[in-house]
Image (spheres, rainbow, N blue to C red):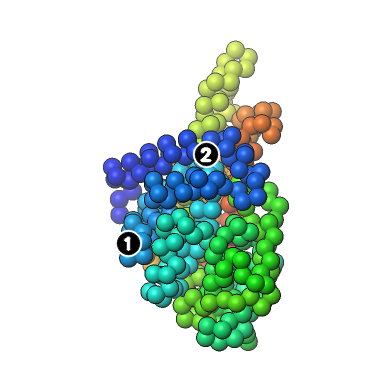
Amino acid sequence: MNFAFSEEQEQLRDAVRKFLEAKSPESEVRTLMETTDGYDPAVWSQMAKELGLQSLHIPEAYGGQGFSWVELGIVLEEMGRALLCAPYFSTVVLAANAILNAGTDEQKAELLPGIASGETIATLAFTEPNGKWDASGITMEASGSGDAVTLTGEKMFVIDGHSVELIVVVARQAGTSGEDGIGFYTVAGDAAGLTRTALATMDQTRKQAKLEFSNVAATPLGAAGSGWAALSKTLDQAAVGLCNEMAGGAQFVLEESVQYAKDRVQFGRPIGSFQAIKHKCADMLLEVESAKSAAYYASWCAAEDNDELPVVASLAKAYCSDAYFHSAAENIQIHGGIGFTWEHNAHLYFKRAKSSEILLGDATYHRELLAQRIGI
């Protein structure tokens, strides 16, 4: 394993950063977060056609470019840095990986090319009103057998669920419990009997929805009732992707804090010369660098499909959640009164940090999960 990025990977980072600086400045983020869909279709199309971001880690056999999770992590880090408003996490990190992990070769060939080209926007619906992230939280039952399956129940906090064309739904066979009987099913966004309601969210840069299913026709994805292993792997991969996002956001707020500490003068001196500010910035630097190391190692484990992935994913999620939230909070403190105002972007990163901390399970949940996975 080499922690240093190659020249090609750094070129990818530079290209994505320049694109996002042009297409996702703060003014555009504020505009898009007020819209219902929460993204710009023109920019989404450019991401697919000019940069190939949606197809980055999808295998070439299914219309992708065949790069690894390391490259995907770089892209997600830059998106987190820019607070990009787009259904990228839901489509590429959640839905595409669920299909890769659970689908048959025929289903992958049918579903993934549309995602790779940017024509299909998708998501994964697995959380329910109980708010649990483990197998016990999945109570929605799938009725019927073979291809004649219907779903009835409710899914909550579905990222971009109100606007996607394809929904990968996690449900269980009747009479099963725990990790048994869990399966994946695909549902069209406009399916009969499906009601989608956008939710009011603290972090307006990432849209969520409530999905209500009433005898909605669904197509099994992969072998019915054998999806827990695939779901567990998908959630671990999603945690890795989210860690890279958080690392990018944490790096940005660190840089913003340091620059403000240099520029802001009080009592005839830059505030960065005061010991209290120095200590805050030094602590942030340590946490951000450690978070990046954890996220990069997790990306390598995902790229290599390493046996350590479940352990490293939980370790990284726990640490990156704390590091990003603390850095975002300290960014507000260093900026003082202006950092609390609506006009400053510090609160946008603070809200993203808090929502990312909770998404896929908070730090406490992942520390407990880590302890279980290493046998403590």
Q: Is residue 236 visible?
A: no
Q: Which residue is mark 2?
A: 24
**Mark 2 closeness class: few <14, some 14–19, many ≥20 residues within 10 Å:** many
**Mark 1 closeness class: few <14, some 14–19, many ≥20 residues within 10 Å:** some
Q: Which residue is mark 1?
A: 60
Q: Is residue 213 left or right of residue 46?
A: right
Q: Is residue 297 left or right of residue 274?
A: left
Q: Whole-percent x and y of residue 6?
A: 29, 45
Q: Whole-percent x and y of residue 126?
A: 59, 68
Amino acid under disc 1? Glu
The front one of 115 and 318 is 115
Secondary element at image label 1? helix
Amino acid under disc 2? Ser
* Upstream in sequence: badge 1 or badge 2: 2
Residue at position x 43%, y 54% from top?
54
Instruction: For marks 1 and 2, give the CA distance.
Output: 29 Å
Quadrant where the N terminus is found in the figure: bottom left
